Amino acid sequence: MGNYKQEGKIRKLKTERSQTFPYAYKKQINMKKAIIIANGNVPLKSQINFLWKVGYDYIVCADGGANSAKKLKIVPDLIIGDLDSIAERNKRYFSNKCEIIKLKRQNDTDVEKALKYLISKNFTEAILLGATGDRLDHSICNLGIVLKFYDKIKVSILHEKSFLKPYTNTVEITTIRDEIISLYGFDDKTKIKSKGLKYQLKNIALPFGKKESTSNFAKGNKISFEISEGIIFVIRDFNLLKKHDLI
């Protein structure tokens, strides 16, 4: 395990981070937002740079996500997991550049290990990248994790140009006119009332496998939901949100 707390190594890490990113490395005492890189498809470095710029400035690699970080020439703050997926050469490379925590427990996935660490450090939001890949079971598991941890940390998923965010209760969202908005529920008891959508939802449920609201549209620059007894997923175009500073 790399000893991240040694002063000389912190200085070296800061130098490498400032060279890697187009933004000066800054370590804040009370950071609340994090990026998690999972062991799925390699994310776009431009997306990580953007998220870093808007405040997601603590980067965690969930085990094999460190392989993606190495490909992207990114030095994370933390690598955590059972470490059976990270390549040995990458483990050696990062050993004196960031903190590495090995947790052997198998009742948690590596992404869950990362989230539990963030929760213990009082983070409130995380964006998960690399959540999808060539294993459908892992992809479905990561979608479930968004629901599982909702009460402890708000987890969103970014995959290519799709940005998934969970919501409950009363929500008002800034939108772009004619923006595509897709909504998904999970059971019959979760009811949704909407305002501002082309196809309004009038206190209806969107139980998974029975009904959904795919490719709905925003009629103007604001939509609102009243969501009772559950959580829904809202999927939007990340590039559009980025363009209009809506992340």
Image (cartoon, grey):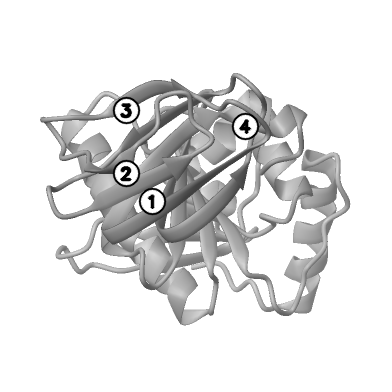
Identify the image quadrant of residue 104.
Answer: bottom left
- Residue linked to disc 4: 72
Label 2 to label 3: alpha-carbon separation: 37 Å
Residue in front for this viewpoint, 189 or 199: 199
Residue kind at label 3, given as amino acid type: Ser
Compared to 239, does 53 lie above or below?
A: below
Please say if the residues under marks 2 and 3 sit with CB atoms less than 8 Å apart.
no
**146 on left or right of 236:** left
Dot 3 or dot 4: first in sequence order is 4
Of the pair 234 and 43, the residue shown nearer to us: 234
Q: Quadrant of residue 246?
A: top right
Residue under the image location 61 percent in, 53 percent down:
76
Pointer 2 residue = 85
Q: Residue at x 65, y 39 (%)?
A: 48
Give the spatial CA distance, label 3 vs label 4: 36 Å
Q: Secondary structure at mark 1?
A: loop
In 3D space, how far apart are the residues under numbered discs 1 and 2 (Cα atoms)? Answer: 6 Å
**Where's residue 247, x and y in %?**
66, 44
CB atoms at circles 1 and 4 under 8 Å apart?
no
- Give the labeled residue for mark 3: 213
**In this rendering, which labeled residue sits more in front, label 3 or label 1?**
3
Answer whether labels 2 and 4 touch (C-beta < 8 Å). Answer: no
| Camera-nearest residue between 161 and 175 | 175
Task: Find numbered disc 3 in the image and state the secondary structure of the residue it sits on.
Answer: strand
Which is nearer the N-term, disc 3 or disc 1?
Answer: 1
Q: Amino acid at mark 2?
A: Ser
Q: Earlier in the sequence, mark 1 or mark 4?
A: 1
What residue sits right under mark 1 in the picture? 63
> Which residue is most to the right?
24
Q: Label 2 near label 1: C-beta < 8 Å?
A: yes
Q: At numbered mark 2, what does the secondary structure look like: helix, strand or loop?
A: loop
